[in-house]
Image (tube, grey):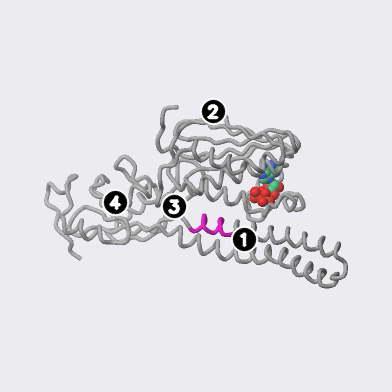
Amino acid sequence: MKLWRATSDQTAIGHLPSPLIATLENLESESIVLTLDEGIVYTSQGIDAIGLVKENRINSEELMALIRVVRRTNEKQIGTIEIPRGPIGEGKRELRVTVAPITESDWVLVLVRDESEIERVAQVRRDFVANVSHELKTPIGALSLLSEAILGAKNDPQAVTQFASRMQSEAHRLTDLVQEIIDLSKVQDSDPLQEAEEVRINDVIEEAMNQCRTLADSRKIWVNAFDIHDVLVLGDREQLVMAIHNIIENAINYSPENTKVAITTKITGDIVEISVADQGIGIADSELERIFERFYRVDPARSRQTGGTGLGLSIVKHVITKHGGEIKVWSAPNVGSTFVMKLPIFKRERN
Ligand code: ADP
């Protein structure tokens, strides 16, 4: 395939012929064109969002290795590479890359497709369906038994009232469960960095706190924010509110009455850390690893009492990881827990 012939001054950093640019811009894949000395002459618009190019250089050793193979062999290479979603955290993007020599020039074309979403969504669906059906069976089974009990006790108004009120709480539980399942699947299916908006951290914290106000009052827990920095992060506002809300709600639910929950922020380099500290029941070391798993609860009976579904923290972990951040927890039984959500800062405003 003959694309075009590079003239001697085109072999230095120069411009691509416009028909080639038009072709690259119409492709579904993102693209990069490199010169012999690995300088970048062209990147398509979406490349910045993928984070594969930094300071006009390729930001992935794996991709550079493929490019060198193409230079050596002059043959097209196809591979899958992983790059971090943000400067911290375990979130990764899986990219399918095709690297090809551009005929009769020393330049190399790289085509990039983000495949992580497709594979991950398929895997998540498979696991999820199995867990969800199991979890839904408990309240549905309880509703069925209770309705039978009501039928059997129709001449005993006191028993009917008692069974009916238990039915009501099972129905609430079912509603909460379905809502959290919907929230989790929304979070899993979306990529907050693809249609990101600028989100003000202090607004998000305020909204999450307001949503928890009634619960906090009913449980006599003081929820206060201190040292909140006015910084902007990139992402999905609604998801970030949901994440912080879930952490504050847990702090309230797993604390005895007349205790405090403190929300603070701290800036470390380009990262904002949002901490939620409680004086609650705490979590044993052996459980800390598992609490972010879907449907995992340390004490299912207590979680049930507070209306917990075991999905809250997995939603939080998804949201924070997909925003290129990470979540850490420190905890000691009967002392309390501190959850720290770290997110990359997009812009700082003055306090
Ligand atoms: P749940 O809906 O059960 O609260 P989560 O996913 O939010 O589910 O949390 C998982 C488990 O982690 C909880 O069931 C609880 O055992 C534990 N946990 C979460 N937050 C706290 C906290 N602040 N203090 C003590 N335990 C907590």
Residue of label 3? 82
Where is residue 23? Give x, y as percent: 22, 61
Residue type marked 2:
Asp
Give me the C-alpha separation between circle 1 and circle 4: 39 Å
Which three-letter amino acid code belongs to the residue tagged 3?
Glu
Q: Earlier in the sequence, mark 3 or mark 2?
A: 3
* C-alpha distance separating marks 2 and 1: 36 Å
Q: Nearer the viewer, mark 3 or mark 2?
A: 2
Where residue 87 sits: x, y (%)?
Answer: 45, 41
- Who's the residue at 28% across and 61% down the image? 27
User: Does 28 lie within the magenta span?
Assistant: no
Q: Amino acid at mark 1?
A: Val
Mark before the other along the chain sequence, 3 or 4: 4
| x 26%, y 54%: residue | 108
- The part of the chain drawn in magenta is 181-189
Q: Which residue is mark 2?
A: 227
Circle number at residue 54:
none
Sequence-earlier tag: 1 or 4: 4
Q: Nearer the viewer, residue 235 or 86?
A: 235
Q: Which mark is residue 178?
A: 1
Identify the residue at horizontal 64%, vertical 60% (top origin).
Answer: 175
Whether tag 4 and tag 2 are in contact, CB under 8 A, the answer is: no
Left or right: residue 328 compared with residue 74: right
